[in-house]
Structures are given as C-alpha cells and as structure tokens.
Image: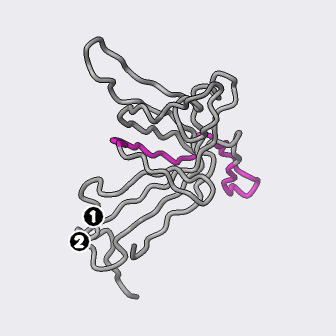
Amino acid sequence: MTLFQINEKVNRFTKKTGALQIESGANQYQLKFAQVERNSIDLNNFDRDQINDQTLCFSLNGDKIGDPTIEFKYTVDLYDTVTPATNVRIVSYWKEQIAKGLPASVTFVELNNTPDATSNKFVREKWTRRIVSVDNETFVNQVLRDATLEIEITAYVSGLRAAS
C-alpha cells in the first residue's frame, strides 16, 4: 500500500486570488467586484430511501442541488439601457425574470489559484445556477452597498485543476 499526502499546506488557497465569471456562449464576463461567494452543494433536496436489501437510494426532488450566495459591489453597468432588459448577464434582467416567475439560468465559472503549489496551481469550477433573489441596500448620502444574489444550483458541470 502506498501512502499519498494530500491537502498539504503548499496547496492551500490562502486568499481569493481568482475570478468569478459568467459564461455566455463563447465569452466570459468577469464580475470584477465579486467580494464573497458561498458555495453549497448538498443532498438536502433528495429523498433518502432504502430498497429491500437496505441499500440507500437517493431521489432528487426537483432540480436544485445546492444554495449558494454571491455578494458583489453595485456598479451602473449591471443595468440595461432598455426595458425589458435584454442583457442576460446583468441585475436588471435577473430582477425582471424573477418578477415574471421565470428566474434566469446562468453558468458561472469560479477560478482560484494557489501561488505556492508546485504544479497545476489553478482550479476552475463551473456551475449552472438559477438566480432566485437579488438583494441590495441603499442608504441616504452613502454609496450603494453590496448586492447579494441568492441562487439555486441546478448543475455542477466540472471542477478541474490545471496549469493555467
């Protein structure tokens, strides 16, 4: 038996040194002011049953496999110049779709790197997510604060480690 060391300090993500992007066709749109992303992929939306030999059987209820949130700073370019909004990558479109009961489905790519790793320093995770809530705060005589997206993960596409 060979013992392999994993989860080593040199491979640790020490701080957010990556990017959060929206994938749209062949293009990537980076959210430059993304501040916090809380990811959750879990079995909370699955029924847990046992068949007659006591083997577990998981059955998905609906299509949700997790509940992440994203916080970012508000900027004017997150709003469309027309109504109804046509740009599927921005807040005004997401809000309009929620109001219609047709939440937008968006593919996000999260890129992280660990500068001290000896090889393959980058991880790219791709998720398909449904935007179910857009929340923001406004105070008189203050800058607009963070906007928060509440999301339902509908597909985990990939999580790949790579050299770049």
Check contact, mark 2 vs mark 1: CB within 8 A: yes
Tell me the quarter of the picture where residue 13 sits: bottom left
Residue 132 place in picture, x, y as percent: 58, 31
Residue drawn at point x = 29 percent, y = 53 percent: 16
Task: Look at label 1 and name its amino acid.
Answer: Arg
- State the quadrant of the C terminus: bottom left
Q: Which residues are magenta?
A: 33-58
Q: Residue furthest front?
A: 81
Give the class, few, some or many, for how many residues have Cα within 10 Å of label 2's Cα (few <14, many ≥20): few
Q: How many numbered marks does the figure carry? A: 2
**Left or right relative to 98: residue 41:** left
Q: Which mark is residue 12?
A: 1
- State the quadrant of the N terminus: bottom left
Q: Residue furthest bottom?
A: 1
Nearer-N-terminus badge (2/1): 1
* Relative depth, front residue between 98 and 93: 93
In the image, is residue 108 above or below residue 9?
A: above
* Relative depth, front residue between 13 and 34: 34
Q: Secondary structure at mark 2?
A: loop
Residue 5 place in picture, x, y as percent: 31, 77
In the image, is residue 94 above or below residue 10?
A: above
Q: Which residue is mark 2?
A: 116
Residue 29 lies in the magenta stretch: no
**Left or right relative to 88: residue 19:** left
Q: Secondary structure at mark 1?
A: loop
In the image, is residue 49 above or below residue 135?
A: below
Task: Look at label 2 and name its amino acid.
Answer: Asp
Give the class, few, some or many, for how many residues have Cα within 10 Å of label 1's Cα (few <14, many ≥20): some
Residue drawn at point x = 64 percent, y = 33 percent: 103
Colouring used for the render: one colour
Residue 53 lies in the magenta stretch: yes
Residue drawn at point x = 68 percent, y = 57 percent: 55
